[in-house]
Image: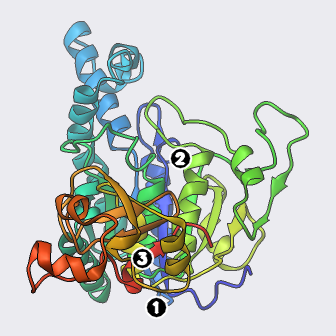
Amino acid sequence: MRDFSKAKRIVVKIGTNTLTKDGGVDAGYVRRMAGQISSLLATNRQVVIVSSGAIGMGAGQLSGYQDTRASGSGYQENRVSGMGAVAGKIKDIKMRQACAAIGQPLLMAEWRKSFLRYGVTVAQVLLTTEVLNNRKTYLNLRNSIETLLKLSVVPVLNENDSVSTDEIGSTFGDNDKLSALVASKIDADLLIMLSDIDALYDKNPRKFADARPIHTVYEITEEIMRSAGGRGTEYATGGMKTKIEAAKIASNAGCRIVLANGRLKNVIGRIIAGEEIGTVFMPKRKLSNRSRWILNSAAGGTIFIDEGAMRALRAHKSLLPSGVISVKGIFEAGAVVMLNDNAKAVTNLSSSQLKALAGKHSSEIRKILGPKHRDVVAIPEDIVFLDY
């Protein structure tokens, strides 16, 4: 359970609150993290970092610049006091994008400088949901990370907030979901999520003095979900709920997850040594890489099917047009779609084709679409159930 001696590929996610201090990156903490991760590399392990903090760092830099202009005094003296001027605007998407663009190179500069002390090269990888949802770019990303790891380079990943088309933070939840997707994508053995909280508790420890830590989670139940808190702080967007959702994603890859307080001394080394720190989430199933991509991709629409068709799918049969009741959304063939609320699938037919074929038998399909068209909506290998 806590034996990580055979964990060769590890993803380390560090949250905004853990990484930053007084409106900027905590350089001393980054150096300590680089030292701990370098120790893992020395044992022939591969490590990927998912690092938050760019927006917070950009806001700190920008507020310091504004204070310096206003007072004429030094940047370091006024960096924190001016934070309020930016904080009022930080919820605006454009402002957050600007802060991310300012903060990201500063963040990478700290990681690069810290790892150079140990002779380790780092690489920056910025992601958006579009990259992960598209099968081609998804595979390209996987190949890129695999190549970097073979070269003994440490990839440092972050959401590409400055160009993201979605509301920043709602997509990956302060990189919680991103770290799980990456762990799933690269077949990681272990995901370490370093946060500003000690563990998952049976209730909110900030509100209830009798809250007790849960050291091992074998199944993410409704009760576990209810014990999760809400969103994070001003610059962070994560919360316990996003961390549990991330644990679900990584679990489908057969990856164990440890949630722990990132400020504990030598926290990574102690986790690897098997010390009972934080909460460990145990996986329930291991899906194939393609199945994981289907499960974690945003659905382009919904195909509503009847009960008989759903029973056939659970018996590992293909989905035929005869079982389709209706279609919601506009999508092309090859898109990932929902099947009722139960499953996701890659459809062989577009939404317009499905609307024309809904409820019809296979013998009628070629008459409508032509002899070369497939008479199957989705094959078993391209269908993944959400419940297990």
Q: Secondary structure at mark 2?
A: helix
Percent position (x, y) of residue 169? Answer: 39, 41
Asked if residue 48 can be seen in this view, the reply is no
What x and y, as percent, mark residue 319?
Answer: 39, 77
**What is the residue that sits farthest to the right in this orientation?**
210
Q: Residue 16 vs residue 324: left or right?
A: right
Q: Earlier in the sequence, mark 1 or mark 3?
A: 1
Residue at the disc numbered 2: 18
Q: Residue at x 47, y 28 (%)?
A: 234
Residue at x 47% of width, y 58% of height? 340
Q: Quadrant of the N terminus?
A: bottom right
**Residue 112 at least partly seen:** yes
Q: Position of residue 35 (x, y in %)?
A: 48, 69
Name the amino acid type tagged 1.
Asn
**Figure colour scheme:** rainbow
Q: Residues within 10 Å of mark 3 (few under 14, many from 20)?
A: many
Q: CA distance from mark 1 to mark 2?
A: 27 Å
For disc 1, the neighbor class at 10 Å (few under 14, some 14 to 19, many from 20) is: few
Kindly report the distance in space between the C-alpha atoms of the residues bearing marks 1 and 3. 37 Å
Residue 166 located left or right of residue 236: left
362 to 203, vertically: above or below: below
Q: Which of the two marks, 3 or 2, is nearer to us in this view?
A: 3
Whether 260 is drawn above or below 204: the answer is: below
Q: Nearer the viewer, residue 194 or 121?
A: 194
- Whether residues under marks 1 and 3 lie with C-beta atoms below 8 angstroms apart, the answer is no
Which mark is on residue 383? 3
Q: Which residue is mark 1?
A: 44
Residue 122 spot, x, y in % from top left: 28, 69
Q: Report whether 21 appears left or right of 388.
A: left
